[in-house]
Image (spheres, rainbow, N blue to C red):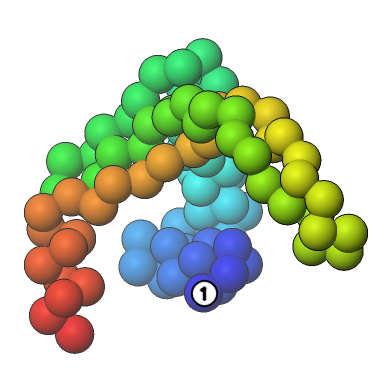
Amino acid sequence: MNKGELIDKIAKDTKLTKRQSSDALNAVLSAVTTTLGKGGKVTLVGFGTFSVSKRASRKGRNPRTNKEITIKAKKVAKFKAGVELAKKVNKG
């Protein structure tokens, strides 16, 4: 499912217009992005938790030259599924 399909589904399920559904989804995504950008986390009980994790620098290899390189440390977004989501995914 892509973003457009998700907006259509929200509109259908909530009886909102596509424009209202798009605005609502964009507001949620913006809130999650802003919170993660500040180093916070977002927990949606039963669904899961979005958080930021620090990845240490490490050694790697350039696949073209096989030369060793250093991969810089960085922050990455993480998602951990909640219990209810995990149950529904494993049920199918």
Q: Nearer the viewer, residue 68 or 7?
A: 68
Indicate whether 50 appears above or below 2. Answer: above
Q: Nearer the viewer, residue 64 or 18?
A: 64
**Residue at image location 51% in from the left, 53% down from the top:** 21
- x and y, in percent, of residue 47 in the image: 23, 50
**Residue at image location 48% in from the left, 26% down from the top:** 54
Disc 1, SS: loop
Q: Write down the residue under mark 1.
A: 1
Dot 1 surroundings within 10 Å: few (below 14), some, or many (20 or more)?
few
- x and y, in percent, of residue 50 in the image: 37, 37
> In this orientation, does residue 29 appear?
yes
Report the side of 22 relative to 40 (left or right): right
Q: Nearer the viewer, residue 24 or 91?
A: 91
Indicate whether 59 appears above or below 39. Answer: below
- x and y, in percent, of residue 22 in the image: 58, 52
Residue at the bottom extreme, as displayed? 92
Q: Nearer the viewer, residue 90 or 12?
A: 90
Residue 16, picture quadrant: bottom left
**As shown in the figure, which amino acid type bears the numbered disc 1?**
Met
Residue 23, picture quadrant: top right
